[in-house]
Amino acid sequence: MGSDISRGRGSGSTRLDSYVDRYAARTSGMTASEIRALFSVASRPEVVSLAGGMPNISGLPLDVVAGAIHDLVQRNGATAMQYGSGQGDPTLREQICDVMRLEGVDAHPDDVVVTVGSQQAVDLVTRIFCDPGDVVICEAPSYVGALGVFRSYECDVVHTEMDSDGLVPSTLRNTIATLKSQGRRIKFLYTIPNHHNPAGVTLTAQRRTEILEICREADVLVLEDNPYGLLGFDGEPIRAMRADEADGVIYLGSFSKTFAPGFRVGWVLAPHAVREKLVLAQESATLCPPAFSQMAVSAYLTNHDWLGQIKQFREMYRERRDAMIQALDDMMPASARWNVPGGGFYVWLTLPDGLDAKAMLPRAVTARVAYVPGTAFFADGFGAQSMRLSYCFPTPERIREGVHRLVGVIDDELELRETFGATARGVHRGYESPNTDLT
Ligand SMILES: Cc1ncc(COP(=O)(O)O)c(C=O)c1O
């Protein structure tokens, strides 16, 4: 009998993994994200975690949800606990169309595929479109969970610039032209237009039109990932890109942030032909999305004032956003920059020149505050000077305390830098470093 170490169990280290020669090549791209590595320390009660992006569902009426689930089991349990359709529950797909209508999307339930969270939607879309070496264009920075999917299908991620108004159309145009001139195969543009994770910015209406035009002209599909669209703090929901372009846009939605992530219900809205392929991919991945979860979400939507609930979520997140921005305004050194998100969960902060958020993290955790270093949101090591701060979960008082601790760490780093010189090192991967200051 080999020991746990010789069998590579429990060590988490590839060097000690005796199965290493047997894995498929694609697993080489599968590494624990910087967020996952942080979870164990960040979840200690003495640490103020500005790291995780967990929805704050403390305001959910659990009695209402419990009642809906109780009724579901009693009245419809045999169906809820059975296999279902690979495309997803027809009633829920109709309700999903009602949800998307709030963002101007006129869709037919036949074109919706229910998925296990929108995370699985990213996976299925990549599975049906991407061969190893195909290019996926992503914002700089981009959602860490999507980067993990693209890596696992051995895609090449090419980042393209954002600023405070979201993805920059002129840079996108140049990126596409350069890739095409190199003979690269671009499979799609992956974009999070609303209340971006991690950047906190929202794409302006004018840029949406321009980006759709650029992609139409270049024949590049758009993968519009929109889990935060209904969590804007001001005004009406923003019109989805999919509302103005049915053929060239694949739209992803989720109930994780507007209801609860534990049900793991998301969806894809795709052109009809693509929908066919997605259902086949879904069937081979899971046979069908869980009937029980789908029917529970459907019952919640039918029996509860879910729009009223989203309004409450928005108010709660807005209060926390305000607490974070106030604390940053009051305490951060003038040479740090950050944006003021109009919705969602995240602020993107760029440190004073010469500081490195990744190198600083152990000292921050020692000071009992956690964040996610910007490098987690790039495929290739950029973003060291920036970090993602989440305000969704801690109370306003804890947010202020967290920022206070973070500022202490930054002040110490600045002092060290004065004494010993810069810690940040530029990383070059053969193309120009994207701007990571999004203010
Ligand atoms: C931009 C983005 N897309 C997709 C997801 C996945 O969400 P879920 O699978 O819970 O729907 C997340 C979760 O944080 C996200 O931020």
Image (cartoon, grey):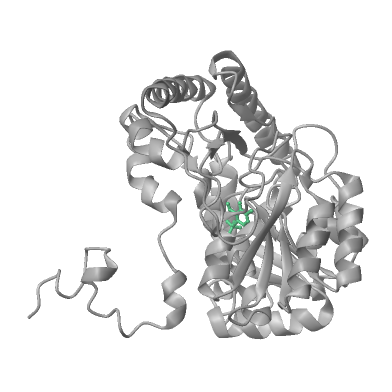
Which sits in the foreground, 90 or 190?
190
Residue 105 visible at all: no
Residue 308 visible at all: yes
Location of residue 392 with respect to 299 vertically, above or below: above
Q: What is the total number of numbered labels drawn onto the structure image?
A: 0
Residue 264 quadrant: bottom right
User: In this rendering, would 34 be left or right of 303?
Assistant: left
Q: Which percent across, then down, holds residue 188?
A: 74, 70
Which sits in the foreground, 74 or 291?
291
Q: Which percent across, then down, holds residue 278?
A: 69, 79
User: In this rendering, would 62 be left or right of 301?
Assistant: left
Q: Quadrant of the N terminus?
A: bottom left
Q: Which percent across, then down, holds residue 83?
A: 56, 80
Name the quarter showing ligand 1: bottom right
Location of residue 104 with respect to 41 vertically, above or below: below
Location of residue 75 with respect to 376 vertically, above or below: below
Which sits in the foreground, 44 or 208?
208
Residue positioned most to the left: 1
Identified at 41% across, 26% down, the residue is 417
Q: Which percent across, then down, holds residue 404?
A: 46, 19
Q: Quadrant of the C terminus?
A: top right
Identified at 43% across, 81% down, the residue is 25
